[in-house]
Amino acid sequence: MARWLAGFLTALMLLQTFSQELLVVDYQLRKERITQLFCVNKDKPQMRCNGQCHLAKQLRKAADAESKAPNAGFAKMKFEALPTGWVSLVRPTTYPLAPRQFAPQRAALYSFAPVRSVFHPPTFRIVLLS
């Protein structure tokens, strides 16, 4: 049952996502019937419209419906806050906190003394040979 539900919801999501592509596929599959029923230019076969005007109307209608959807393309976030009266009913218990030291046993093992004898600028000496 859960697999069927997951497949059904996936199919619905894909149908919504690919709605315009499905309209084009439907037009390609039923081109002759759409031309006979919905074509505006039946009396002008030299235009070779073949129902493309109907397809354009359907695509425009799908695009308008997608753009009119509330918050189209954006995720809706909802933040809820607790009522202030509920918070005032609960009194937090306070405990005196002792000062804590971070790893006091290791602090005594660490010392830092920069080595200055290695890191110095080069010096220039003039040696006179006589």
Image: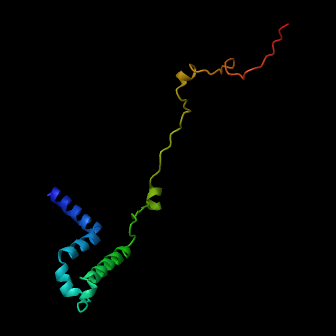
Q: Where is residue 66 in the image (x, y as percent from the top left)?
A: 34, 73
- Residue extending farthest to the left is 1
Tell me which residue sits at (66%, 19%) in the image.
Answer: 115
Q: Quadrant of residue 9?
A: bottom left
Count numbered badges in the picture: 0
Q: Position of residue 42 (x, y in %)?
A: 23, 90
Tell me which residue sits at (69%, 20%) in the image.
Answer: 116
**In this view of the protein, which residue sits in the foreground, 86 or 41?**
41
Tell me which residue sits at (27%, 81%) in the image.
Answer: 52
Would residue 55 appear left or right of 89 to someone viewing this image? left
- Residue extending farthest to the front is 46
Q: Is the image coloured rainbow, by chain, by secondary structure, or in one colour? A: rainbow
Tell me which residue sits at (37%, 76%) in the image.
Answer: 68
**In this view of the protein, which residue sits in the foreground, 87 or 18?**
18
**In this view of the protein, which residue sits in the foreground, 127 or 57?**
127
Q: Position of residue 64 (x, y in %)?
A: 36, 78
Q: In which quarter of the image is the N terminus?
A: bottom left
Q: Where is residue 3 in the image (x, y as percent from the top left)?
A: 16, 56
**In this view of the protein, which residue sits in the foreground, 21 or 65?**
21
Would residue 62 appear left or right of 77 to someone viewing this image? left
- Residue extending farthest to the top is 130
